[in-house]
Image (tube, rainbow, N blue to C red):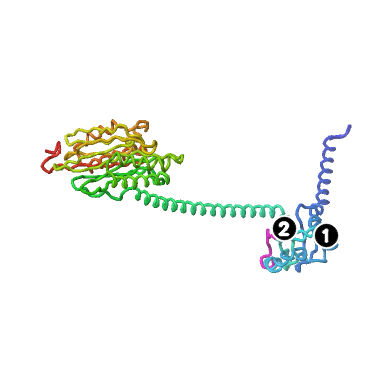
């Protein structure tokens, strides 16, 4: 900027020269200040480590006065015990061999006796003759870095603990899963063994009669309530029954066991079907209903005797059970009515009605529980298989043997999939055809 009446160029030139000189002087004057108050520590030491020069920044970090340090102590004396040991055994020997070290982590004794983590870089300065004269060292405060490393280490340890805990949790979960599978397997084995004890392991061979049976358990984790049996009464007479108790599980198993053995015992005393069901009704009513916990079952009980012509005379009675299906050798099939039969065990002194039929050669009598007719069918599983569908099935298989009927029904039930969600028992009794009497369609 020019003064009034002066030469602008001369004035401007003079100002520029003054500013350059002032700036140069400022740089020259502040070089020592810049060294002394730098954001990092600086010091120079003789080759034996004695401190010859140190800046104010480092003195403030260490809480020392310059007079206490310069010419009085060595660099290693400023370090902690561990830092001093590392300096003497590693740092100093390497520096003498290499002439320069950068970024070495050490600890210095700071104000208040605290440890100051630092990063140290040192270089050996040589004279004109090549002899080492002094060591210049730069010291950076690594507190933030140490804090970061410690935080990183803490997080790493936490992550490792979390991983270990997760591994333990996974191992425990796997152990629990394996134990649960083993428990389920043992339970399934126990239930299967108990279930087998509630039904005969195999049907006895009956001269002049074909027999077949099938039992479907809806769940391996629950005891079923369906039951059946076929046994001899002596003198060529046979008894059979098939039924379904109320409920599932251990209580149903207890009721099933009582029902089976009551039926067998009553039949040996008086095999008349209505009398047998009356005995069972009395036992169940007195055992459960009289105590305020009524239990009941549905059941068909029957007897078989044989005529001189090889026919099977069947007498049966039903206690609230679905009617038996009779399939004839001529291709006809129909239900055998058993009217008046009430649930067994509900009311005292219940009455039951006798039904009779003759099975000629080629005829089959099918007994079943309601799991078959109440199976859910169709794409949406909303429709029941029902009595009419079973009757149509019977008519379609009327000319087949008892084992063939059960085999066909088993295949039908497999097609129901998850629609068959109840226990289902099937029992078929049939009189074999005479070898000289071919079945319709096989002539």
- The residues tagged by marks 1 and 2 sit, at their Cα atoms, a distance apart of 17 Å
Residue bounds of the magenta highlight: 95-105
Q: Is residue 334 above or below residue 53?
A: above
In the rendered image, residue 219, in percent from the top left (x then y), is placed at 39, 44
In the rendered image, residue 211, in percent from the top left (x then y), is placed at 23, 45
In the rendered image, residue 317, in percent from the top left (x then y), is placed at 29, 37
Residue 104 magenta-drawn? yes
The one nearer the camera, 368 or 93, is 368
**Which image quadrant: the N terminus?**
top right
Name the residue at 13% across, 38% down.
442
- Residue occupied by mark 2: 117
- The answer to which image quadrant residue 58 occupies is bottom right
Whichever of callouts 1 and 2 sits on the residue coming sooner in the sequence is 1
Name the residue at 49% across, 54% down.
175
Left or right of 36 on screen, residue 321: left
**Is label 1 in a helix, a strand or a loop?**
loop
In the rendered image, residue 191, in percent from the top left (x then y), is placed at 39, 49
The one nearer the camera, 371 or 47, is 371
- Residue occupied by mark 1: 64
- The answer to which image quadrant residue 87 occupies is bottom right
Name the residue at 37% across, 41% down.
282
Left or right of 186 on screen, residue 150: right
């Amino acid at each position: 900027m020019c003064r009034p009446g002066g030469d602008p160029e001369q004035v401007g030139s003079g100002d520029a020269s003054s500013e350059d000189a002032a700036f140069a002087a400022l740089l020259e004057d502040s070089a020592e200040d810049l060294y002394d108050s730098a954001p990092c520590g600086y010091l120079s030491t003789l080759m034996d480590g004695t401190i010859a020069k140190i800046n104010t920044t480092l003195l403030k970090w260490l809480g020392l006065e310059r007079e206490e340090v310069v010419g009085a102590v060595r660099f290693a004396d400023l370090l902690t015990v561990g830092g001093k040991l590392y300096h003497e055994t590693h740092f100093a020997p390497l520096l003498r061999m290499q002439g320069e070290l950068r970024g070495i982590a050490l600890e210095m004794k700071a104000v208040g006796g605290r440890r100051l983590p630092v990063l140290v870089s040192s270089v050996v300065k040589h004279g004109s003759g090549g002899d080492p004269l002094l060591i210049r060292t730069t010291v950076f405060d690594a507190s933030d870095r140490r804090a970061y490393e410690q935080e990183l280490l803490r997080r790493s340890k936490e992550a490792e603990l979390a991983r270990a805990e997760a591994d333990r949790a996974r191992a425990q979960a796997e152990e629990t899963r394996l134990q649960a599978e083993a428990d389920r397997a043992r339970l399934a084995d126990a239930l299967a063994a108990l279930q087998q004890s509630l039904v005969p392991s195999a049907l006895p061979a009956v001269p002049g009669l074909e027999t077949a049976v099938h039992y479907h358990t809806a769940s391996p984790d629950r005891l079923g309530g369906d039951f059946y049996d076929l046994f001899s009464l002596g003198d060529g007479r046979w008894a059979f029954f098939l039924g379904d108790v109320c409920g599932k599980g251990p209580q149903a198993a207890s009721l099933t066991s009582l029902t089976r053995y009551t039926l067998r015992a009553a039949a040996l005393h008086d095999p008349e079907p209505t009398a047998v069901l009356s005995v069972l009704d009395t036992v169940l009513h007195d055992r459960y209903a009289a105590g305020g916990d009524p239990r009941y079952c549905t059941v068909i009980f029957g007897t078989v005797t044989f005529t001189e012509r090889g026919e099977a005379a069947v007498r049966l009675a039903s206690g609230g059970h679905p009617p038996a299906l009779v399939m004839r050798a001529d291709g006809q099939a129909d239900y055998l009515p058993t009217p008046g039969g009430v649930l067994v065990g509900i009311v005292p002194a219940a009455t039951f009605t006798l039904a009779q039929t003759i099975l000629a050669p080629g005829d089959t009598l099918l007994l079943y529980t309601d799991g078959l007719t109440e199976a859910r069918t169709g794409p949406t599983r909303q429709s029941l298989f029902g009595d009419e569908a079973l009757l149509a099935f019977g008519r379609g298989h009327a000319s087949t043997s008892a084992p063939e009927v059960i085999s066909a029904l088993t295949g039908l039930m497999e097609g129901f999939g998850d629609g068959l969600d109840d226990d289902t028992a099937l029992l078929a009794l049939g009189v074999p055809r005479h070898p000289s009497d071919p079945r319709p369609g096989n002539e």
